[in-house]
Image (cartoon, rainbow, N blue to C red):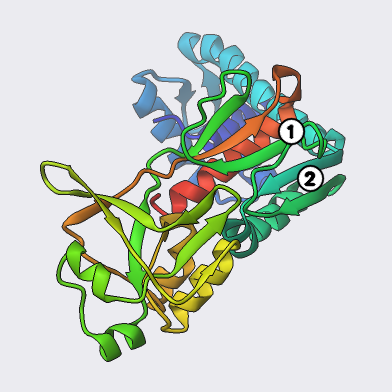
């Protein structure tokens, strides 16, 4: 595999007619410079420099390859300069809607990091579990869970393999005992989520390996229209929750929550970045999409 630093040593050596002079300008030892040229020659299977005790000259192949090496370095330099210029030019305000739990516990930190890359960028954030009306609220992009069936929207996957997971705190399990089967859920305090469309107290699972679907009616003494509250109750040992793995990732990683019934798969909960129309898919939005994909992938979701 070609190495950028080897190309730089070769070009500088050709320009100066001396390995030692090239090494001094690049701030490396002559031995390292010589090794770089030899490594490049071995990679290419060509002899680029003809060395004697008194002189160093380009071979015919070296003279021909030199122009390609110069062009490769020029293109890389141009690309780097373009990226730096892009960072300076990406500005303005992004209006973003996102779910409460994901927003507070992961997305806000990720957006802070992204803003450090593009200091001229400003945010207006809407953090709520109610589905944003992107027209009325004048939202540029929305971060949404679930399958996006509205063909009028542009939905770009961020974590397509994300799913829901059944969890409880170590304290809850110590007090109430382990969950041995899905049917045991009906004997436990289940923490439910509620919105305008009603109480989400019918939980669906898939028994592995056949993925047999099982839907259970659950009940408990607490429900909320804010998914972050449901997660907090679970961490406090007040019951069992069934939530997006992404929402729960910091608590799972820290051991504050434990996944239950590994032989059972949860419902799919893919995460998307959504725009209303193609004109909103700007270079900045694409950069944000790629950045958020990287963050999700780093969590193995």
In this rendering, is residue 162 above or below 182?
above
Mark toward the start of the polypeptide (1 vs 2): 2
Q: Report which residue position mark 1 lands on.
A: 284
Residue 158: give x, y in percent of width and height.
Answer: 51, 39
Residue 108: give x, y in percent of width and height.
Answer: 68, 59
In this rendering, is residue 298 above or below 219?
above
* Residue 31 at least partly seen: no
Residue 60: give x, y in percent of width and height.
Answer: 49, 8
Q: Report which residue position mark 2 lands on.
A: 118
Q: Residue at x 36, y 27 (%)?
A: 43
Disc sitting over residue 59 in the figure: none
Residue 281: give x, y in percent of width and height.
Answer: 70, 25
Q: Residue at x 74, y 44 (%)?
A: 96
Quarter of the image holding residue 187?
bottom left
In this rendering, is residue 76 above or below 94?
above
* Residue 9 at least partly seen: yes
- SS at circle 2: loop
Q: Label 2: few (<14), some or many (≥20) within 10 Å?
A: some
Q: Residue at x 70, y 42 (%)?
A: 132
Quarter of the image holding residue 81?
top right
- Discs 1, 2 touching: Cβ within 8 Å: yes
Q: Give the alpha-carbon distance from disc 1 to disc 2, as whole Å.
A: 9 Å
């Amino acid at each position: 595999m070609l190495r950028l630093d080897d190309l730089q040593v070769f070009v500088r050596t050709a320009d100066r007619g001396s390995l030692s002079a090239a090494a001094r300008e690049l701030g490396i030892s002559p031995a390292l410079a010589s090794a770089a040229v030899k490594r490049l020659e071995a990679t290419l299977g060509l002899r680029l420099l003809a060395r004697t005790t008194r002189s160093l000259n380009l071979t015919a192949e070296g003279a021909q390859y030199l122009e390609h090496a110069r062009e490769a370095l020029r293109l890389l330099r141009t690309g780097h300069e373009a990226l730096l210029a892009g960072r300076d030019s990406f500005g303005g305000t992004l209006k973003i809607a996102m779910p409460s739990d994901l927003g507070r516990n992961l997305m806000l930190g990720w957006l802070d990091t992204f803003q450090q890359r593009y200091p001229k960028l400003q945010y207006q954030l809407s953090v709520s579990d109610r589905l944003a009306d992107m027209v009325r609220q004048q939202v540029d992009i929305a971060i949404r869970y679930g399958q996006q069936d509205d063909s009028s929207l542009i939905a770009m996957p961020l974590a397509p393999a994300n799913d829901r997971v059944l969890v409880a705190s170590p304290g809850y399990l110590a007090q109430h005992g382990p969950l041995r089967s899905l049917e045991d859920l009906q004997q436990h305090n289940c923490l439910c989520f509620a919105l305008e469309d009603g109480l989400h107290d019918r939980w669906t699972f898939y028994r592995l390996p056949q993925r047999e679907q099982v839907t259970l009616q659950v009940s408990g003494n607490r429900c909320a229209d804010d998914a972050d509250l449901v997660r907090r109750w679970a961490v406090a040992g007040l019951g069992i929750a069934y939530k997006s793995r992404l929402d729960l990732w910091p608590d799972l990683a820290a051991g504050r929550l434990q996944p239950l019934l590994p032989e059972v798969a949860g419902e799919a909960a893919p995460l998307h970045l959504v725009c209303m129309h193609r004109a909103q898919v700007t270079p900045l939005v694409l950069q944000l999409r790629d950045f958020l994909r990287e963050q999700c992938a780093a969590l193995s979701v």
